[in-house]
Image: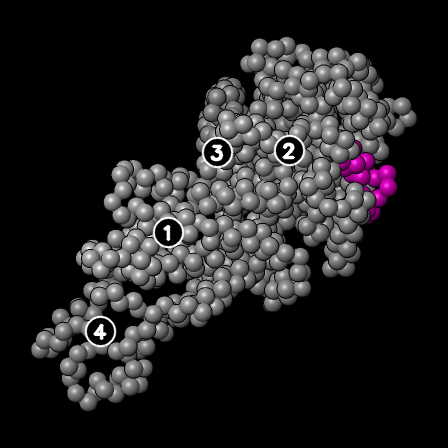
Amino acid sequence: MTDTTEAGPTGRSAARRKEPPPAPATGTPGPPPAPRGTRLWRGVTPWLFLIAPLALLLTFTYAPIANMVAYSFTDWDGVSPELHYTGAGNYTELLTRPELFEVFFVSGYYLAASALQIVAALYFATILSFNVRFRNFFKGVLFFPYLINGVAIGFVFLYFFQDGGTLDSVLSLFGVHTDHAWLGTPTSANISLAGVSVWRYMGLNFVLFLGAIQSVPGELYEAAELDGANRWHQFRYIIAPGIKPVLSLSVILSISGSLSVFEIPYIMTGGATGTETFVIQTVKLAFQFNKTGLASAAAVVLLLIVLAATWVQRRLVPDDRVDLV
Amino acid sequence: MNRRTIPALLTAGLLLSACTGTAGTSKGADAKAVDDPSKVSGTIKVLTQRTDLVQDGTMKKYADDFRKTYPKVKVEFEGLTNYEADVKIRMNTENYGDVLLIPGVIKKSDYPKFFASLGTQAERAKKYRFTGFTMVGGKVYGQSPIGVTPGFVYNKRVWREAGITDWPTTPAEFITALKAIKAKTDADPYYTNFAAQWPLTSWTYVNGSVGCDTGATTKLVEGDPWAKGADLRVGDTLLYDIVHEGLAEKDPTTTNWEASKPRLAKGQIATQWLGTWAVIQFRDAAKKAGVDPADIGFMPFPAQVGGKFCAVVGPDYNQAVNVHSEHKAAARAWIDWFTDKSGYGEDNLAISPLKDAPLPAVLQPYTDAGVKFIEVDDTAGAQLKLIDSESEVGLYGPDYRQDLVDLARGARKGSLDGFLGDLGKRWTDAQRSVGTR
């Protein structure tokens, strides 16, 4: 949010007092001043439109978060009518128990997988943005997994990885008989689960990239082709810079996604065999050990970590405007 | 006004309002027993975890029977698949049915805030079992309609084919028996049901059977559950040995509970540690698979005290009356009727909660073998839960046993002694911090 017309509250109001603004800060063109009632009405209108979404946003997003932050300073067990204020006790406990943060190593698998996922999505989006036969069919195929419910995916892949399940049968068609327990060891299990995650979320990245690529004006390609650029050149000098904002958004989403993986490992392994993630651990603290206060604090810490990661990333790769034309 | 101050103000307001999230406290109500059935009226809602019985109409049949005695009471059921988690959240409101099963998460000392009392223990204990499990300050707050005892569900035919006709009497004999099954039959000698999680949790219920001690729960609270010779250590060591010796299924991480029932019935799996409640499900699975339901057997934990096996009889979920219910009399009538007269216990081959009732036929072999039945004293139950949560060991969760199975099959580094020693240390540390609080 960088609003360049806004010079800070004092400067702006000072400017307003001196003379009727030639172009007010809100950006509306300045016709002769309307009667008072109309002006008021105009000021209220956008808020009226916003009432419904704001009410929903406040009720279902900010109120629960505020609640959670409040709980994180108590010893609430999740059901008892009584709760006591414990100050920063939960946060102290969290930070003095390093084993609670060891689970972030698991996020490494998902982070590596999401790098792979972005590359693959970019590859498919580029290919399918050119004129390829059956391209709409392939678009559908690639996006389809994202539409399936995460719980269903968990169950489907449980069968997939079973001893003698789909994966083993497919491999044996090619003459490979592995006899490998896919979810059997921590490394293998985490790689398998991260693979499922790639399968599920690649469609989303793909669609984002495809949309961005298609918003690049077509005449640029024509011009490039006339200049003798091949497909790689087109990608390197037109597509890549053109989709940079979307690319950096995808990176942010995958980092925060990798730090807070939940659905797939929770349903498939329940966090067993070294697949426990920070969110699974938090859920267990809250619902198995009834430490709702501590779990709320853990959730707040996770939120801060994600925010920090995003901030660092934005500092490293600033989101400057791209101008292709 | 600066545009940025608006969200800040809103957030502050929300923070203030957030602190008033929990419902008010109401304390102490009685749901008195009913003398005249024709005077009770109202519509009551009964929460249950048996979604299968709600769906196939069995619960409705019970409700119809109930109405023959109590014509003015209408009973509605609400089946919850994920009972514990769903009800836990609803306990923050006043709207959690008229009759419900007491969730494990509620602290015993909080029972009077959530449930109406069913009477004093002195009076109820004359007729019913398990009164101690829901007693607070001399009053009883819940009643389980069935009693269960943990044990191994096994396929008699497979065990016979392996040449074993007598129940093993020590864990070592049990391992030898499973080895014989592995050598002589095609069956998986044991099935952990690792992925379903709760079947591993049920190993906690070996507590009491090993030492045949009614004070087993108190021992957990006062001592180290994984000390040499302690019940849980014996049980967990047996589980470890089963997996470590390769006597369990090949890939535990992708097990399937529903599929394990017909497989055991057909003799592809020989044994599972569950409870009496499971026998009926396996017999049904046998009928569906077209094999003989009589092959499904049930045996106690392989440990004897004074030459006798020991079986711990415990309650299932306890039914209770919501303290906020407007039809407490009707709710109480339902609990009494469901416990005494519904036939729910017989239908499930369960042990009756009535003291004078005979044992179910499925436990006839127990009577023949002279198995001693005990009820563990639950006075220290509340303290046990407190230590369990504080230590994050999770006796009633799957985690540490999943780790144990991983350890046994080599997917996790460490030794059994180190693993159990660490659990013991966490447990005793928590005992200290809970005790000094």
How far is disc 3 from disc 2 in space, using C-alphas?
17 Å
Q: Position of residue B388 (x, y in %)?
A: 70, 48
Relative placement, left or right, of B305 versus A316 is right
Q: Can residue B323 be seen here? A: no
Q: Label 3, on which residue?
A: A156
Under circle 3, the secondary element is: helix
Q: Label 4, on which residue?
A: A26
How far is disc 2 from disc 4 in space, using C-alphas?
63 Å
Q: Label 1, on which residue?
A: A122
Give the camera-side residue of A137 and B66: A137
Residue occupying the point 53% across, 43% down: A193
Question: Which quadrant of the figure has residue B322?
Answer: top right
Q: Amino acid at mark 3?
A: Val
Q: Earlier in the sequence, mark 4 or mark 3?
A: 4
Question: Nearer the observer, disc 4 or disc 3?
Answer: 3
On screen, residue B166 above or below B242: above
Parent chain of label 4: A
Give the camera-side residue of B415 and B399: B415
Mark 2–mark 4 contact, CB under 8 Å?
no
Q: Earlier in the sequence, mark 4 or mark 1?
A: 4
The residues colored magenta run B221-240
Q: Label 2, on which residue?
A: B252
Parent chain of label 3: A
Residue A39 is labelled as none
Classified by dominant secondary structure, the portion drawn in magenta counts as helix
Give the camera-side residue of B389 and B46: B389
Q: Residues within 10 Å of mark 3 (few under 14, many from 20)?
A: few
Whether the magenta-drawn stretch holds residue B288 is answered as no
Q: Residues within 10 Å of mark 2 (few under 14, many from 20)?
A: many
